[in-house]
């Protein structure tokens, strides 16, 4: 079976998958959001991400959490809206792919969610006295595989 750029090989009869490449989001925040929804059922993951986008549920930061204020019941956390929107779009795409294949998305859970650094888009920011500072845009590649659960 041809893998076509996915990190894992999945059974096409019981799984659906989707990818988004070069998304203009922080890979660090995208990894934290992916860790939050990994293993969840699709409906629960979508609801959780919508709450993060509405800034009702914080995402706990496990790495890179120095000088990050604590949120109630979570510890150090933030509301990465941009990364949550990108991951939500990929999960909804995988859900649509499952529906197209004849599977029921309500009985599916996220088995694999992977974030990889994409290309860095170079840029600069003008500074005083005719100087400039690097101001690059980080991108992330997002991959989601959902599978049926009993």
Image (tube, helix red, strand yellow):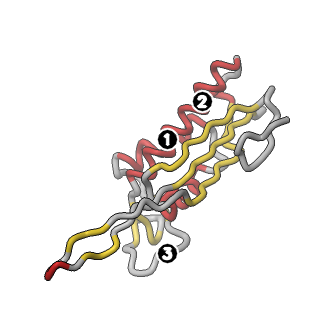
Which residue is at 66% across, 25% downward?
Answer: 98
Q: Position of residue 85 (x, y in %)?
A: 43, 44
Q: Residue furthest front?
A: 130
Is residue 11 rendered to the left or right of residue 70? right
Q: Earlier in the sequence, mark 1 or mark 3?
A: 3
User: Where residue 19 appears, x then y in whole percent?
Assistant: 60, 41
Alpha carbons under labels 1 and 3: distance apart: 23 Å
- In space, the residues marked 2 and 3 are separated at their CA atoms by 31 Å
Residue ID at (63%, 21%): 99
Q: Is residue 127 above or below residue 83?
A: below
Q: Which mark is residue 88?
A: 1
Residue at mark 2: 95
| Mark 2 or mark 3: whose residue is earlier in sequence | 3
The residue that mark 3 highlights is: 64
Q: Earlier in the sequence, mark 2 or mark 1?
A: 1
Closer to the camera in the image, 146 or 55: 146
Residue 120: x and y, percent? 47, 62
**Quadrant showing the C terminus:** top right
Q: Secondary structure at mark 1?
A: helix
Find numbered disc 2 in the image and state the secondary structure of the residue it sits on. Answer: helix
Residue that appears at 17% across and 78% down: 130
75 sits to left or right of 111:
left
């Amino acid at each position: 079976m041809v893998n076509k750029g996915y990190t894992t090989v999945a059974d096409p009869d019981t799984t659906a998958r989707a990818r988004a490449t070069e998304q203009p989001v922080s890979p660090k925040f995208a990894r934290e959001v992916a860790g939050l929804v990994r293993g969840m059922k699709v409906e629960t993951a979508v609801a959780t991400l919508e709450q993060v986008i509405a800034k009702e549920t914080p995402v706990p930061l496990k790495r890179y959490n120095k000088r990050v204020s604590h949120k109630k019941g979570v510890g150090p956390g933030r509301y990465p809206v941009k990364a949550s929107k990108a991951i939500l779009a990929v999960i909804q795409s995988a859900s649509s792919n499952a529906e197209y294949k004849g599977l029921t998305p309500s009985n599916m859970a996220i088995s694999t969610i992977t974030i990889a650094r994409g290309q860095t888009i170079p840029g600069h920011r003008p500074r005083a006295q005719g100087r400039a500072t690097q101001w690059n845009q980080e991108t992330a590649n997002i991959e989601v595989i959902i599978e049926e659960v009993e």
